[in-house]
Amino acid sequence: MKKLTQIFQDRRQSLQIKLSKISQDTKIPQEQLNNLEQGNLTNFGSYAYLQGVVKKYAEYLGLDPEVMTSYLRREIEQQQVKFIRVTDYQVNSRFPSLNWPIYAIIFLVVLFFALQLFLSWQKPLLELRALPKTITVSQPLVIRGQTESGVLLYLNDEQIYQNEKGYFSESLYFKTPGERQLIIKAIGVNGKEQTEKFSVNIKAD
């Protein structure tokens, strides 16, 4: 009488299906499928787990799960299989599971200080919308942009203000033609500065 492992192997080969394909479809690890076909039954954590694998594998190959389970019980009794339980390998772990909250707290503390260090060196956000390069004396120069809450803004050393969402808008009027150099500076809560320089040519009407 054929063994369970041989029945599985012969059936799979007759259907020309690879173990990798079966593993992908059934979510059974390929290593366990290989152990089953090789007869390495002790490599399964428990009889209940092995029985579940056998039933699922049998259904996939079009075999009767109950018949295959009876074959399994017979072979387990004949071979006097002793299962290797996963928990046996976890008892002497160098990092006991009871200590995981401590490691989690240490990780969060380190992450917090790393974030604070990063923020202390980061320059504030300063984004400006596109500005015209040339305007006339009758046109205002509208400066629009966005920064962060709490940032100090200066336009040519004169403070301007942003709203709660960080948006700002300033209109400048020039009475005489010529080229003007403008500097807008943002100073963050950490003291870091971000500066944008631009020029505009003022023409007579």
Image: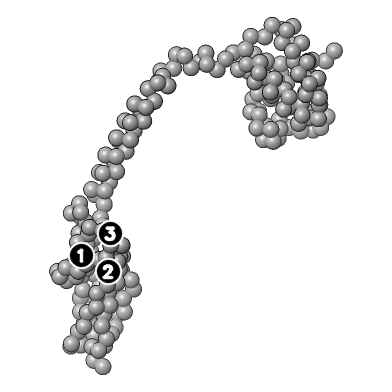
Rounded to the nearest angstrom, the CA distance separating label 1 from label 3 is: 10 Å
Identify residue type, mark 2: Phe
Asked whether 12 or 115 is in front, the reply is 115
Q: Which mark is residue 168?
A: 2
The image shows residue 81 at horizontal and vertical percentages of: 67, 9
Indicate the quadrant containing the C terminus: top left, top right, bottom left or bottom right. Answer: bottom left
Above-or-below relation of 190 to 111: below
Above-or-below relation of 64 to 186: above
Indicate the quadrant containing the N terminus: top left, top right, bottom left or bottom right. Answer: top right
Tell me the residue at 69%/6% (across/down).
80
Rounded to the nearest angstrom, the CA distance separating label 1 from label 2 is: 9 Å
Residue 182 in view (yes/no): yes
Give left or right: position of 13 versus 126.
Answer: right
Element type at mark 2: strand
Give left or right: position of 100 versus 168.
Answer: right
Element type at mark 1: strand
Q: Which mark is residue 148?
A: 3
The image shows residue 11 at horizontal and vertical percentages of: 81, 26
Above-or-below relation of 173 to 147: below
The image shows residue 156 at horizontal and vertical percentages of: 17, 71
Classify 10 Å Cα crowding around label 2: few (below 14), some (14-19), many (20 and above).
some
**Which of the 4 quarters of the picture holds residue 173?**
bottom left
Classify 10 Å Cα crowding around label 3: few (below 14), some (14-19), many (20 and above).
many
Element type at mark 3: loop
* Residue indicated by mark 1: 153
Task: Say whether disc 2 or disc 3 marks the residue closer to the N-terminus.
Answer: 3
Asked whether 59 or 19 is in front, the reply is 59
Circles 2 and 3: CB atoms closer than 8 Å = no
